[in-house]
Amino acid sequence: MVRILFLEPFYTGSHKYFADGLAARSSHTIEVLTLPGRFWKWRMESAGLEFARMIRRLMEKADTETGRDFEKPNLILAGNLMDLAQFKAFTPWPDLPHILYVHENQLDYPIKAGEKRDLHYAWKDYTNFLAADGLIFNSAYNLESFLEKFRDFSARLPDSRPSDPSDVIRAKSKIIPPGCRLVNPAGSGTASESQIGAGLRESAPVILWNQRWEHDKNPEEFFRFLRELKKRETPFRLIVAGESYKDSPSCFSDAEEEFNEELIHMGFAESREVYEDLLRQSDIVVSTAVQENFGISVVEAVSAGCLPLLPRRLAYPEVLSPEFHGHCLYRNENEMMERFLVLKKVLEKGPEAESLRTALSKSVEKYSWDRIIPRFDSLLGSIAGRGSRE
């Protein structure tokens, strides 16, 4: 067992989910220091120095109050929305191994309409990856998308262009997805039966959105798809969960009125129990994302018995087992409708539907924290051990 200090500069959403899950389940001792999940650009500029200050304050406080120092960890693990090189310059422990967990990269993150990509933050990703002693990416897609796009990015630099970093970055990288809190599909069913009714459920599948209400999840396409279903007079019921923000796309507020007759639920679930019940009520979880490096919400929904309808891009072909690609992945909006109608027919065939639900649910068991945590513990323990011998 080793001591790990986890620095999470953007403590919200999937970043919080991962940090809390890892700290709670690891066999190592993990202490988490966090900064609020807002102002992501400022976090990338300032979090390294702020974390170094926080550590020094903790050391001084411990010395004053207990007569002993804040205990030095064996390893630093950090989320990637910070300047790791800056932190290493100011940390009291520059000799420790510094590992970066890479949730996303700034060459792959889609910008909003009318905005220009700030290449400064793509450069900061690059220097972070060089400064880290080890990198853990949440998917191979995340790693490869950065390396592929870096070639074009480098060509646009005015001078002092770096050589292709692919070999260097791959040599220090591992792929470990975040552990997930899977949902037992055998719930009480109370809300499902009372709100939907068994007969209606067969003819009107319950469509689920359970992702963030942000532009990178491409909600406009999702609601266009629902409008097309209504135009075709194809019945459905609707659950829209996920976290909303002050600047969430306006299509969500419009949808509450437009799909009022279909809506079962609209908004962030008030508790984990309510959220899991919403997943169990749902039949088909839909993603239209243009940015996704893993897809925790989709994995949770599939574990609860939902059939996934996902774009054949991003990390989805990697996360979803290949035997389900033909049923569940689409290339464009026309194919999305085709796949949906096929899944709807499957749902109308009881034994076939249950067989597919069960197979999908079992296929994502590999992402449960029970399966994932030994991979993290083994890797982090090995790195900490190497660091202590150097």
Image (cartoon, grey):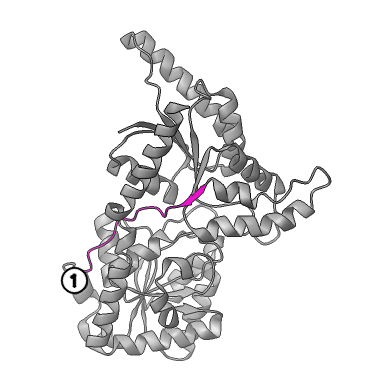
Nearer to me, 252 or 17:
17
* Secondary structure that dominates the magenta span: loop
Q: Residue 149, can we see it? A: yes
- Seen as rendered, the residue at the extreme front is 389
Residue 129 lies within the magenta run: no
Where does label 1 land, which residue? Answer: 189
Identified by mark 1, the residue type is Gly
- Relative image position of residue 11 (x, y in whole percent): 44, 42
Residue 175 lies within the magenta run: yes
Q: Residue at x 34, y 11 (%)?
A: 68
- Relative image position of residue 377 (x, y in whole percent): 34, 43
Secondary structure of the residue carrying numbered label 1:
loop
- Relative image position of residue 308 (x, y in whole percent): 39, 74
Q: Residue 109, can we see it? A: no
Nearer to me, 351 or 225:
351
Span colored in magenta: 173-186
Where the N terminus falls, by quadrant?
top left
Query: In the rendered view, does 374 fall on the left or right side of 309?
Result: left
